[in-house]
Amino acid sequence: MNRISARRGEASSPIFARSPAGSKRTRARIKGAALVGSLAFACGANAELLKFETRPDGPNEAVVATVKLDGASYEIAGTLAKPARPPSGARSILIETQPSDDVKPQALERGLAVLTLDVGKLPDKAREPALRDVLGHLRGALKIKRVLGRAQGSDADTMSAASSAFDGLLLYDASREPAAPTRFIATWGADAYWREKPRIEFASAAPPNGRRFYLAGIASSTATANCVAPVNARPSAPALRALFAALDEWTAKGAAPPASRAPLDGDLAPSQDLKWPKIPALPAPPEGARRVPRIDADGNEVAGLRLPDNALPVATFTGFNAQKDKKGPLCTAGAALPFPATKSDREKNPDPRPALVERYGSRAYFVATMRVIADKLVKERLLLPQDADAYVAAARSAPF
């Protein structure tokens, strides 16, 4: 482990370059010193960098810094992963605030370094200026030309507030958007409309520096604890990977991303006006005044970006569920209510939704149609080819 005190004017760290095998300690010291300078500047007059350490962590490097803010000490942990193949052009980095495999592997393949930086232990008021200043100096210390960010929820709001430090942001379930000129792609799922404090929808389209994508029928939580109905586990990762590729090309090459696919306020309806099919075991929708996406005869949402398993569904997917035990933990997941497999199954357990065989006929037809839908999204740059193949492969195991 290398412990390095904060010093200004150190040589920059060649994080994309290959160094001789005998210079590991030198590389760690240079890299650590560069980042120390960044953090020392980040904290402003009321902060002091007490410690900065780096150590090998498998193929990555673990980063730990201790910062003193207003008399209290806080630890900032991070992990730096380098691309296997250094980029041929300008150096770029993706900043995440939580470890995730949704986008990170793709970023590394595209030649970006990835720094997972945990700012969660900093006071709320310090996160935005610290992040902005750290990244501002990170550009100079590591000679980074392009900084992208990816975060969810309150962390996404922090990145939006610090948007001047970023060239582009991929946000999930943020309550605010970055100011120009920072380019952004904002995403959210069905649960945003059904939680206790529902999302307030936009009255106008996204600004020129942004795009908005509503991920129809996807819920951000897949926790099964204390939920009555089967949990909606549809992943957002396929959409996020495609949108990250679009953001990367937008910020690196100026290639415009796909047009927004998100409902405006006029595309929503009062929740009490929705006509839900009488599905066995359908949880009661949460009470309270709210405007939500419209649904079709199956109870699936029709607005936004519909991934292949929503455009060609085998179940009704909601952004809400219900609690088994009212005194237990809150069920934050959505529900997934499978269609009956056959007509006899539908009649045996009365269900108004056509059975799988009734709506698709055969598995061969289902697989072929899934390929058409997936390939169309690939052409629209809303799905990557490998994810399109994964949807088709899953269709071959459809439950009918």
Image (cartoon, rainbow, N blue to C red):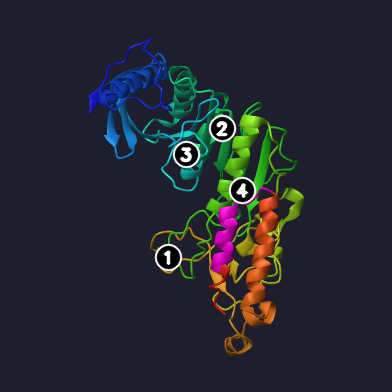
Q: Is residue 323 left or right of residue 55?
A: right
Q: Position of residue 328 (x, y in %)?
A: 38, 63
Is residue 70 at all visible to an observer of this figure? no
Q: Earlier in the sequence, mark 1 or mark 3?
A: 3
The magenta segment: 381-394
391 within the magenta span = yes
Location of residue 127 (image quadrant): top left
Badge 4 local density, few (<14 within 10 Å), some, or many (20+)? some
**Residue lying at 68% horizontally and 82% vertically, measured from the top left:** 358
Q: Which mark is residue 326?
A: 1
Q: Main secondary structure of the magenta part?
A: helix
Q: Which mark is residue 160?
A: 2
| Label 1: element kind | loop
Location of mark 3 (residue): 108
Location of mark 4 (residue): 199
Q: Earlier in the sequence, mark 3 or mark 2?
A: 3
Badge 3 local density, few (<14 within 10 Å), some, or many (20+)? many
In the foreground, 190 or 9: 9
